Image: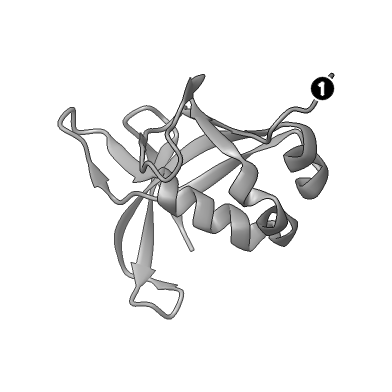
Amino acid sequence: PGVGAPFGCGLSVFRIRQGCTGRWHGMVEEVEVKVVYFASAREAVGSEGEAVRLEAEGHGEDGEPYVTTDVLVKVLLERHPKLRAIFNTIVLAVNMDYADKGQSVRLKGRDEVALIPPIGGG
């Protein structure tokens, strides 16, 4: 598949895609977000973080492409099956602001999403 020039914030790109077969035919925008893992989430994934590129779901009022945390979570759970066992205890923070459990937040390019499990202590 071909990748074109950067668009908007420089993290979204155009790609050509044909139907649902994985071939490429139309213009599809992507949004890249940074994902950071803490504590047991880091252990489950085996990494401190990663950049995740997702197909844009739409455009905000400012014209910037976005994807939601719902889609990001689905992709992360598919990519890292060990996260499933602990995900119900994880809280998401988007750009250092906690998201309410079950809340769908719009993400733009360069946004950071942290997966934060409960921290024990004594």
Q: Tell which residue pokes out farthest to the left in this image.
A: 61
Disc tally is 1
Report if residue 95 is visible in the image: no
**Percent x, y of residue 91:** 56, 36
Q: Is residue 20 above or below residue 48?
A: below
Report if residue 89 is visible in the image: yes
**Percent x, y of residue 94:** 47, 28
Q: Is residue 19 left or right of residue 69?
A: left
Q: Tell which residue pokes out farthest to the bottom in this image.
A: 21
Q: Nearer the viewer, residue 88 or 57?
A: 88
Q: Is residue 61 above or below residue 79?
A: above
Q: Secondary structure at mark 1?
A: loop
Q: For residue 105, which quarter of the picture?
A: top left
Q: Residue at x 33, y 77 (%)?
A: 19
Q: Is residue 93 left or right of residue 66?
A: right
Q: Residues within 10 Å of mark 1 (few under 14, many from 20)?
A: few
Q: For residue 79, which quarter of the picture?
A: bottom right
In the rendered structure, which amino acid carries the disc numbered 1?
Gly
Q: Nearer the viewer, residue 54 or 4?
A: 54
Quadrant (top left, top right, bottom left, bottom right) of the C terminus: top right
**Percent x, y of residue 46:** 82, 45
Q: Residue at x 51, y 46 (%)?
A: 53
Q: Residue at x 37, y 33 (%)?
A: 108
Q: Nearer the viewer, residue 72 or 33?
A: 72
Mark 1, residue position: 121
Q: Residue at x 63, y 50 (%)?
A: 87
**Percent x, y of residue 101:** 46, 40
Q: Nearer the viewer, residue 18 or 116?
A: 116
Q: How is the image coloured?
A: one colour
